[in-house]
Image (cartoon, grey):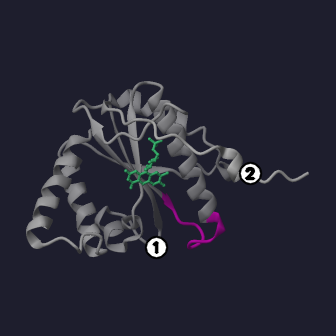
Amino acid sequence: MRSRRTILDYKPEKVNREKLLELFQHAAYAPNHHLKEPWNMKIYEDEARSEFGKKVVDSYIRLGLLKTLSEEKLAKARQSYDRFFRSVPHHVLFYMNKEDDGGYLDDENFAAVCAFIQNFQLAAWAEGIGTMWTAKPTLLDEVFIGDVGLSPIKHRLVAVVQIGYPNKIPRDRGRTPVQQSIEWIN
Ligand SMILES: Cc1cc2nc3c(=O)[nH]c(=O)nc-3n(C[C@H](O)[C@H](O)[C@H](O)COP(=O)(O)O)c2cc1C
């Protein structure tokens, strides 16, 4: 738990599919209410990465996240995003089915998918495999949800997680003493 770092820079080789499946199966032991196992994944690899990256960047533009960039800088940013998306062996889009239109049951399922993701991150790290959990307003962008073949009425996106063998491991920036976040009540 302490040594895992979020990885931005990956080696080009893919993680073997059997290994990924084994790690996802470990992750599925995440707590989840009524054993709904609400996690679903779309995994983008090889040629599909660029197209997926383009949809993500289109969403950033639609949402105004890149609005400070000039036309020229935006074109450069697109190229640099494309290089990033092609540099990561696997991009996993996590999503779940909506049950009660953003209500409490959906929150429970969202929490379970997050537990799954962290289980996966830790199991992967134990095998020398790096991950990056990303979440941006794009996950709520209805056009993006449609672009990836899902429905904003039926589905909720949870995260995009990058996976691969780390090329560079960032330094540990530490954590504050957890005591600061606790109120002991006797
Ligand atoms: C819900 C969620 C969203 C995140 N979104 C991003 C992101 O968009 N970009 C990013 O670089 N890291 C993202 N992270 C990773 C955090 O930045 C990272 O965990 C934090 O900086 C601590 O670094 P560490 O994981 O190496 O300990 C996200 C993590 C979580 C849990």
Residue 153: numbered disc: 1
- Is 9 above or below relative to 186? above
102 drawn magenta = yes
Query: Quick one: label 1, few (<14), some, or many (20+) residues within 10 Å?
Result: few
Residue 182: numbered disc: 2
Name the amino acid, label 2.
Ile
Q: Indicate the position of residue 29 as horizontal and vertical percent values.
A: 60, 37
Front residue (pair 41, 59): 59
Q: Is residue 165 visible?
A: yes
Name the amino acid, label 1.
Ile
| The quadrant where residue 143 appears | bottom left
x 23%, y 74%: residue = 67
- For ligand 1, tell me if the residue under mark 2 lies within 8 Å: no
- For ligand 1, tell me if the residue under mark 1 lies within 8 Å: no
| Label 2 to label 1: alpha-carbon separation | 38 Å
Q: Residue furthest left?
A: 72
| The quadrant where residue 138 appears | bottom left
Q: Residue furthest top?
A: 127
Camera-near label (2 vs 1) is 2
Residue 61: numbered disc: none
Q: Indicate the position of residue 154 as horizontal and vertical percent values.
A: 47, 68
Q: Which residues are magenta?
A: 96-105
Which badge, 2 or 1, is on the more N-terminal residue?
Answer: 1
| The quadrant where residue 53 appears | bottom left
x 11%, y 60%: residue = 76
Q: Indicate the position of residue 160 as horizontal and vertical percent values.
A: 38, 52
Dominant SS of magenta comes to loop
Q: Quadrant of the N terminus?
A: top right
Element type at marker 2?
Answer: loop
Front residue (pair 3, 153): 3
Element type at marker 1?
Answer: loop
